[in-house]
Amino acid sequence: MPQKPPAPSFETLLDSAREQALHLELRDVYAVGEERDVYAAFLRDGSVPADDSAYWSGWLPLVERTVARGVKVARARIVSEPVTEYIRFEHAITDANLRAGEEVRWLSRCHASPLALPGNDFWLIDDRIVRWNIFSGDGHALDPDHTEDPAAIKLCAEAFQAVWELAVPHADYRI
């Protein structure tokens, strides 16, 4: 049986997008290594990284050039309330995502109960490929996966749309 190739990088995915790049986040805590220092600073004194910081150096330019091509980049987050400290951090840094051109909405987990959702966070690119972001129980990023399976694409497209319709725009979401 041939081995499946690794999941495409975010750069490859967003550079290949022609219409939309949709991201659904389902966790209340992430323990992503490259966030360790900025998250610790936020917990210590509420500081957030500047748009031109090393923290944002890869992501914000990627989003900016994607949006400049006319691609919609949208992120929806389902969160438990009251929110975790990590979600407070995400909320505090989201203005940088918005300035880069992302649209971001938030949905309280209690409002997501009737929705059919996939088991993992994902990126859906142009209704043609899904990149699954896989995390350990304690929030550490594991190797991502991907699929072009039409049933998985349909599930993700419908799930994202259902969440987006119920979710609150970032500017209106209070924690």
Image: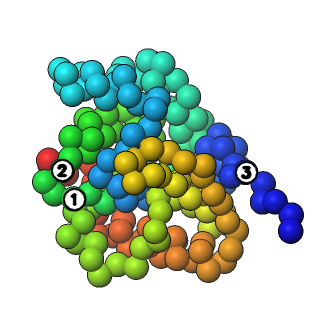
Q: Image height check: is 75 above or below 88?
A: below
Which disc number belongs to residue 83? 2
Q: Amino acid at mark 3?
A: Pro
- Residue for point 53% across, 54% down: 133
Say if mark 3 contacts mark 2, CB within 8 Å: no
Depth order, front residue of 66/27: 27
Say if mark 2 contacts mark 1, CB within 8 Å: yes
Q: Residue 91, position in %: x, y? A: 26, 41
The answer to whether 99 appears left or right of 17 in the picture is left
Among the two numbered marks 3 and 2 on one chain, the one whose residue lies closer to the N terminus = 3
The residue tagged 1 is: 80
Q: Quadrant of residue 76?
A: bottom left
Q: Secondary structure at mark 2?
A: loop
Characterize the local packing of mark 3: few (<14), some (14-19) or many (20 or more) Cα atoms within 10 angstroms. Answer: few
Q: Secondary structure at mark 1?
A: loop
The residue tagged 3 is: 6
Which disc number belongs to residue 138? none
Q: Residue 155, position in %: x, y? A: 52, 76
- Residue for point 62% across, 67% down: 127
- Residue for point 69% across, 49% down: 8
Q: Amino acid at mark 1?
A: Ser
Among the two numbered marks 1 and 3 on one chain, the one whose residue lies closer to the N terminus = 3
Q: Amino acid at mark 2?
A: Val
The answer to whether 166 appears left or right of 15 in the picture is left
Q: CA distance from mark 2 to mark 1?
A: 6 Å
Q: Residue 49, position in %: x, y? A: 35, 22
Q: Secondary structure at mark 3?
A: loop
Depth order, front residue of 97/9: 9
